Image (cartoon, rainbow, N blue to C red):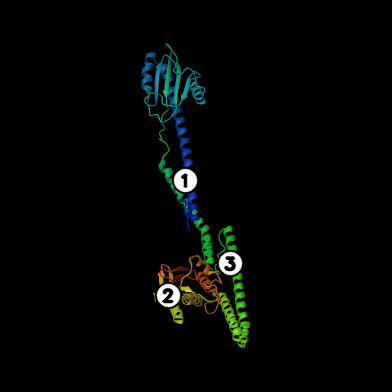
């Protein structure tokens, strides 16, 4: 069976596991990203809060000392995350209109007892005059007026302090992801196997039915849809088996019932004195007898009533060849099958080779798990466009059904039916040196 294009697994269980894995990985990655972004936002807000609290704490300390000392305090208070300066003018003249700037300005003003403060929050690094480890955080610029004379402003440019945690640890997240993935896959594979086993049984039974096994049935287990499919398949098999049995009984009855009147007609025809009238009548009755015998043989071709057992092909073919004067070569092989049906299969093929090809050479060989039988003749062969047609009932190469040249054209149909019922196959091919090669392949030791 050909696989479809792409990289998806071939089985339902594999595709189901892949789908669950992809969904689980995607869900965990989304959760990881959301958690990381939330943690980053929380860290940024916490860092900004700590920095604002530190700045607010500087204001009373600076106002308690002389103006000239404030510059030194501001220099000592500067960090790699912030630049603190005492200057004669405010760097931020008005609070920015965004919500975060107004929020920080309100918090500073409230902490300083209502003193006005101007704040501006903007994305980007705070500039080359601030030594810091900037990691994409917003820059916060704050200007706070200091009491005393001359007028001075505490100007702070900061990006907020880094979080002590250093981000979300990836190791535990990956471990949790791996464990959850393994657990879900284990459970999914168990349920997928329980789901696909009935489907595999149904596929195997359908294959056996395609080979002609009307006894193949499927256990009606599994999910509701699978049980319904199995029940429908079993009902179909039973109906086909009944139809086949009825058809075979009808063919056998017709063939059998025709024999009595044809025998009576032959006796009467032989009593005719005029040879010119008698001989054509007898030939016609012989042809009708061949057709009737072919119908009976075709109706019995499946051998459904015969028990299956281990058949030694070498012994079976030795008897067939000895009875017909064909040659046998090759090794030995055993198959599970119905001896009488297999004898009819190879007997028909050897008879055809002798009748139309003048000789028959039978060879047994092994082909892996199968046994192969080749039947060669030295006749004219078959036109390539008619090879498949020859397996149809009542089809013959010479388009005649006389007792002298052959039967009713049912031999290959019977042979193919028996081979298919045994899980095998038949192929016809013209030989390079002339003649026809009929190849029969049967599985070794597999019950039908």
Query: Mark 2, mark 1: which one is toward the viewer?
Result: 2
Q: CA distance from mark 2 to mark 1?
A: 62 Å
Q: Is residue 48 shown to the viewer in this render?
A: yes
Query: Mark 2, mark 3: which one is toward the viewer?
Result: 2
Category of crowding for the residue at label 1, using alpha-carbon neighbours closer than 10 angstroms: few (below 14), some (14–19), many (at least 20): some
Which image quarter: residue 257?
bottom right
Asked which secondary structure carries label 1, the reply is helix
Query: Does 423 appear above or below 136?
Result: below
Asked which secondary structure carries label 2, the reply is strand
Locate residue 71, reporting x and y percent. 37, 17
Determine whether label 2 and label 1 are within 8 Å by CB.
Answer: no
Of callouts 1 and 3, which one flags the residue occurring earlier in the amino acid sequence? 1
Category of crowding for the residue at label 2, using alpha-carbon neighbours closer than 10 angstroms: few (below 14), some (14–19), many (at least 20): many
Q: Which mark is residue 25?
A: 1
Of callouts 2 and 1, which one flags the residue occurring earlier in the amino acid sequence? 1
- Looking at the picture, tell me which residue is in the foreground, 351 or 330: 351
Asked which secondary structure carries label 3, the reply is helix
Of callouts 2 and 3, which one flags the residue occurring earlier in the amino acid sequence? 3
The residue depicted at 40 percent of the width and 21 percent of the height is 84
Q: CA distance from mark 1 to mark 3?
A: 45 Å
Q: Which residue is mark 2?
A: 362
Query: Does 69 appear above or below 275?
Result: above
Locate residue 171, reporting x and y percent. 40, 43
- Looking at the picture, tell me which residue is in the foreground, 297 or 115: 297
Locate residue 436, reporting x and y percent. 45, 71
Q: Which residue is mark 3?
A: 237
């Amino acid at each position: 069976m050909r696989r479809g294009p792409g990289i998806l697994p071939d089985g339902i269980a594999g595709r189901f596991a892949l789908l669950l894995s992809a969904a689980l990985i995607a869900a965990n990655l989304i959760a990881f990203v959301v958690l990381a972004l939330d943690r980053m936002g929380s860290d940024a807000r916490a860092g900004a809060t700590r920095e604002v609290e530190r700045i607010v704490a500087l204001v009373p300390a600076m106002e308690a000392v002389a103006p000239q000392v404030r510059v030194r305090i501001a220099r000592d208070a500067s960090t790699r995350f912030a630049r603190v300066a005492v200057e004669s003018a405010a760097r931020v003249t008005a609070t920015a209109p965004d919500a975060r700037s107004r929020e920080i300005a309100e918090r500073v003003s409230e902490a300083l007892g209502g003193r006005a403060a101007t704040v501006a929050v903007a994305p980007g690094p705070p500039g080359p005059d601030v030594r810091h480890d900037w990691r994409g955080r917003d820059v916060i610029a704050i200007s706070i007026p200091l009491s005393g004379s001359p007028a001075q402003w505490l100007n702070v440019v900061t990006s907020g302090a880094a979080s002590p945690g250093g981000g979300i640890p990836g190791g535990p997240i990956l471990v949790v992801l791996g464990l959850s993935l393994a657990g879900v896959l284990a459970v999914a594979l168990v349920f997928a196997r329980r789901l696909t086993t009935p489907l595999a049984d149904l596929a195997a039974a359908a294959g056996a039915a395609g080979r002609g096994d009307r006894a193949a049935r499927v256990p009606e287990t599994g999910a509701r849809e699978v049980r319904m499919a199995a029940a429908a398949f079993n009902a179909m098999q039973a109906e086909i088996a009944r139809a086949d049995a009825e058809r075979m009984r009808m063919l056998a009855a017709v063939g059998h019932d025709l024999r009595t009147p044809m025998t009576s007609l032959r006796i009467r025809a032989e009593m005719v004195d005029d040879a010119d009238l008698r001989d054509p009548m007898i030939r016609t009755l012989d042809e009708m007898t061949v057709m009737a015998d072919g119908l009976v043989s075709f109706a019995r071709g499946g051998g459904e009533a015969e028990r299956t057992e281990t058949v030694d092909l070498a012994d079976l073919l030795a008897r067939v060849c000895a009875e017909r004067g064909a040659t046998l070569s090759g090794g030995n092989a055993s198959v599970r099958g119905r001896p009488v049906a297999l004898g009819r299969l190879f007997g028909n093929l050897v008879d055809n080779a002798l009748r139309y090809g003048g000789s028959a050479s039978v060879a047994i060989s092994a082909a892996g798990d199968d046994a192969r039988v080749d039947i060669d003749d030295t006749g004219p062969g078959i036109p390539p466009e008619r090879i498949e047609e020859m397996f149809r009932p009542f089809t013959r190469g010479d388009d005649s059904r006389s007792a002298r040249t052959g039967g009713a054209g049912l031999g290959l149909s019977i042979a193919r039916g028996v081979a298919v019922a045994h899980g095998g196959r038949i192929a016809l091919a013209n030989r390079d040196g002339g003649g026809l090669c009929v190849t029969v392949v049967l599985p070794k030791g597999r019950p039908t």
